[in-house]
Image (cartoon, coloured by chain):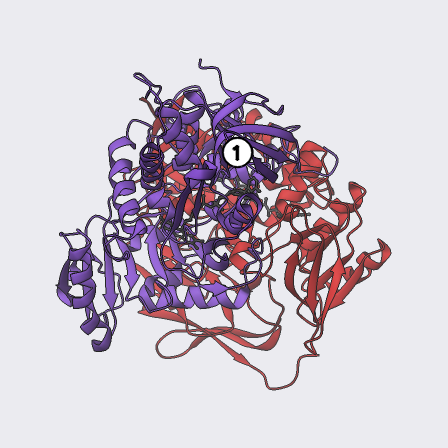
Chain colours: A red, B purple
Amino acid sequence: MKASSCRVAIVGGGPSGLAVATELAKMGVDGVVLLEREQDAGGIPRHCGHSPFGFREFHRIMKGPGYASRLVRRAQQHGVSIRTGASVAKIAPAGGLVLSTDDGVERLKAEKIVICTGNRETPRSARLVSGSRPLGVMTTGALQSMVYLKHRRPFKRPLIVGTELVSFSALLTCRHAGIRPVAMIDNQSRITTWQAAAWLPRLLGSRLLMNVELDEICGRERVESVKIRDAAGRVSSLDCDGVVFSGNFVAESSLIRGSHLELDARSGAPAVDQFGRCSDADYFACGNLLHPVDTAGWCWAEGQRIAAYVSASLDQTLPPAERSVTVETESPWIKYFTPQRIALPDSFSAYYHPGLQLRFSEKLQGRLSLCDEHRNLVGHKIRVQPERRVLLSLPASESLSACESLTIEFTPSLEKVP
Amino acid sequence: MPDYSVSDSLPTSLFDIVIVGSGVVGCAMARRFSLEGASVLVIEKEVDILDGASKANSAILHTGFDAPPPGSQEHACIVDGYNEYLDIHSRLNLPLLECGAMVLAWNDAEASRLEQILQDAHRNGVGQARIITQKQILAREPELAACVVAALEIPGESVIDPWSAPYAYLLQALDNGASLVRSCELLDGRFEGDEWLLETNRGRIRGRQVINCAGLYGDRVNQMLTGEPGFEIRPRKGQFVIFDKSASALIQSILLPVPTELTKGVVVCPTIFGNLLVGPTAEEQMSRIDVNVDEQQLRALVEKGRSILPGLVKHEVTATYAGIRPATEHKDYQIKWHPEQNYCCVGGIRSTGLSAALGIAKTVFCQYVDNGGRHTALQHYHWPQVSQIADPGPRDWQQPGNGGIVCHCELVTRREIEQAFEGPIAPRSLAGLKRRTRVCMGRCQGFYCAAELSDLTDGRFVQPIGVDQ
Ligand SMILES: Cc1cc2nc3c(=O)[nH]c(=O)nc-3n(C[C@H](O)[C@H](O)[C@H](O)COP(=O)(O)OP(=O)(O)OC[C@H]3O[C@@H](n4cnc5c(N)ncnc54)[C@H](O)[C@@H]3O)c2cc1C
Ligand SMILES: Cc1cc2nc3c(=O)[nH]c(=O)nc-3n(C[C@H](O)[C@H](O)[C@H](O)COP(=O)(O)OP(=O)(O)OC[C@H]3O[C@@H](n4cnc5c(N)ncnc54)[C@H](O)[C@@H]3O)c2cc1C
C-alpha cells in the first residue's frame, strides 16, 4: 500500500478548505496537501451556476463556477498541492488518513489535519415522506449538478419544498434549464429566507404556497403528482413530475462519525473549540461542516482564520487545548451552536473570531445571553429567524478564566413577533 | 467468457423447463434445473429481475427455529435452503454475516413464552438455541434498553445480501446454459399433451414443463394455466427504515421480538452493507404493487427502534422502503406438481423465501425426478463470482484501477458501475443498478452523485434519470 506524509492535510476542497490551504501557503507553511474526492476542487459552488459569490474574496459578484475556479487557481499559485479524485475513507488517530484513489488505498500521515467536508441537504428518506419512490425526487444539490455540470433536466415541472435561500437557488436553476416549477411550498406562514425573495416564484410563473405541507408523493415510474395539505387539513392533489427537497442542511460528518473524534449531538458536527480544534487537538474542522448552512464567503473567511490557528498550532504557540470551559445550553429553541468549548487563556484575540455561532429552530425574539455559574457575562436582545446565523460574541478572555462552564440562555419575549 | 443468452428476442426453441418469474425463487429454480442438465428459460414481466416481493426484505437467513413444524414444506425448504447457502456462498463470492439472533422478552408475560419458542426451536432441529438472562443479553448488547427481561439466543441466524444472492443464482444458471427474457409477461398457456404453448406479450414460447414462480401473481398464473387459482394471494406490506452506517455499531446481533399470532413483529437488525434496519410492519392490503411508505408508520418504526436501542436518537435515517409478502389464506407454502399437466406451482412463499429459495428449488427438482423427470447433471459447471459490495469487503475502492469513487456514501466505484452494465444481466432501471451496486443508496441519496450517474447510465435504462435523455 502506498504511504506518504505531509505537514498539513486538508480534507475537502470547497471554499473553506481552499481558504485554509491558500492562507497556510501564504504564511509560508510547507507541505500543505488538499484532498478532494471530486475530479475538480471548488466544492458546492462548482455547480451553482448562479450568483452571488465572491464579494468578500474578490470584491465582485460572481457566479459559482467562476468563483470556484478562481479560488482553485489562487491556491495553486501559492503552491498548494491539490489532489483531486482522492477520497478520504477514514480518519485515524495520530494524524492518519486512509484515502481511496484510482490506484486503490493509500495512507497519508500529517502533523495537522483540517476537515472541511461541508454539508448537504436532508433527502426525502430522512424526512420520512409518505408515498411511492419514483424517479424525479431529489435535493437542490443533485438538481444543480445535473443542470450545470451535465446539462441535463431531471424533470420539467417539479414542486420545490422549502423556502430557504437554497430553495431560491433551485428556482433559479430551474429557470436556467427551462424547467418551470409548479409551486414552491412551505409549512411556515412566511418564507425562511429574506421576505423580499417572495415575489420571485410568481415572477417566474410558479405559485408560492405557504402553510402547506407535502403529504404524499405519487407516481409509479416517475413522479406524477403530489398530495399537499393546507393548514386547515384539506388535502389536494397537484400535478407535477418531480419534487425538489431543498435546504434542511446537515453536516457531512460521516468521516467524524467513523473516527475517534467527538461529535456534537446538536449540530451533528465535530465538537470544536474557538480555534476549530476537535477533541483531538491535532485535528481541526472548518466551514459548513461546523454550521449548516452559511454562505461561501463566510466559510472562506473562517478558513483564513483557521489557517492562522493551524499555523500557530504547528509552532506550538496556540493556547493548549487541555484547559478549556465547555459551553452548554438547555434552551429548546436553540437548534445548535458552535464552538462547544473555549480554550483558555485566549491569548489569540489578535485574530478576530466571531464568537459563538447559533441557529434557532423558530422565528422568535428575546434576549440571548452567555452566563457562567454566577452571572450574565454578555447578552443582547435579538430577533431570530430559523436557518439564519446568529452571533454571540465572547467576553474578554480574562473574565472567563475563573469559569467552570458557560451556558447559553435564551429568554423569549412575550410580545408576538410581527 | 461463457456465452450468455440474455436477449431481447424471444427464443423459439423448445425448452425443458420454462420458469415464470425471476424473484429469488425463480432465480434459485433456474440454477437448480440448469445444473441438473435441463434446458431452462426464465421469463420476467418487469424490465428487470427481483422487482416483485424479492425487492425488499429483511435479508435474514433463517435457521427455521420458528418455522412451522417438521413435515411442513416451509420447514424442509428453510433447512435445505439454509444449508445450501452455507455450502455455496463463498464459491459465488456471496457474503454471510454470522451475527446470531435474540428473541427479546420485554416483560414477564413475554418471558414466559420463551420456553415454548425454545421447544419449537429444538423440535425444528435448531439445537443451539438457549434462553439467556438479562445480564448475558446486556453483556452482548450493551446499547440495548436495560428493561429487557430475558431472551432466546439463536446463534445460527445470519444476514445476507438480498439482491446479490438471487442475482448470483440466476447468473450461475445463465452461465451454464439457461436463458432469460425480461419485459416478457405470460398471458396465456395451453398444454398440448407433451408440451406447453405459452403466449406472452412478446410472442409464443414453448416448454415441456412450466414452473410458476410468479410470487405476488402466483394465483393468477395458476388460474391462467390450470383454470383454477388454487389459493388466493393476500398481499401483506412491510415497511422499513434504514439507519445510517454510524448506527450499526449499536448492535451485534439480530434483535427479534416475541412473535404474535399475526406477525413475527418488528426486528432491529444489521444489514450486510453496514447499516441498521428497523422493520417490517405487517399491513394487509388489496394491491399487489402498492409499496408506498407512510409517514406515520415510518415514525412509529423510528420510535420502536429507539425504544429498543435508545442510542438510535443520535443517528440519521438513510432510507425508507416497503416490500410485499405473497401471503395466502394458508400458513404453509403452496408447492404442488401437477404431473398430468407437466406443471408445478411454487406459490405463497410468504416471508421466508430468501432463506428457503435454494431448498425450494431442490424440493421441486426432487419431486420432478419422482414424477419421471430425467436429465444428466452437468459434470463441471461454472461458478461465477459476483462483485463484493457488502461492508466487510474487500471492496473495489480498495483496489487499483477502480476509476475513482462515484457514490461517496456507499463507496461505489466507476469500475463497479461499468461492470454491472457489462454483466449478462445488465440493469435496465436505476432501481436495478442500485440493487447491483448500491449507488444512491447511502445517506445523501444522490446529493453528490446523481449528476455523474445520469451521465454514466445514458441510454441504459428504460426510464432514464433525466427527461431529455
Ligand atoms: C444549492 C446550493 C446553492 C448555494 N448558493 C449559494 C450562493 O448563491 N452564495 C453563497 O455564498 N453560498 C451558496 N451556497 C453555500 C455555499 O455553497 C457553501 O457555503 C460553501 O460551498 C461551503 O464551503 P465548504 O468548503 O464548507 O463546503 P463545500 O463547498 O461543501 O465543500 C466540501 C468539499 O469537501 C469534499 N469532500 C467531502 N468529503 C470528502 C472526503 N471524504 N474526501 C475528500 N473530499 C471530501 C467535497 O467533495 C466538497 O468539494 C449554496 C449551497 C448550495 C447547496
Ligand atoms: C417485508 C418483508 C420482509 C421479509 N423478510 C425476509 C427475511 O428476512 N428472510 C427471508 O428469507 N425472507 C424474507 N421475506 C420473504 C421473501 O422476500 C419472499 O418470500 C420472496 O421474495 C418471494 O419470492 P418469489 O420469487 O416467490 O416472489 P417475487 O419476488 O414476487 O417474484 C415473482 C416474479 O414473477 C414475476 N411475474 C409475475 N407474474 C408474471 C407473469 N405473468 N409473467 C412473467 N413474470 C411474472 C414478477 O414480476 C416477479 O418478478 C420478506 C418479505 C417481505 C415482504
Ligand 1 occupies quarter: top right
Please state the horizontal and vertical placement of residue A369, each as a whole percent of the image.
Answer: 49, 74
Q: Is residue A205 visible?
A: yes
Please state the horizontal and vertical placement of residue B43, each as a whole percent of the image.
Answer: 54, 33
Residue at 66 percent of width and 60 percent of height: A162
Residue at 43 percent of width and 64 percent of height: B302
Point out the image quarter for the C terminus of chain B. top right
Figure quadrant of residue B381: top left
| B81 displayed left or right of A178 | left
| B145 displayed left or right of A49 | left
- The amino acid at mark 1 is Thr
Q: Is residue A23 above or below residue A355?
A: above
- The residue that mark 1 highlights is A22
Residue at 45 percent of width and 35 percent of height: B342
Please state the horizontal and vertical placement of residue A133, each as a whole percent of the image.
Answer: 59, 51
Q: Is residue A329 above or below residue A40?
A: below
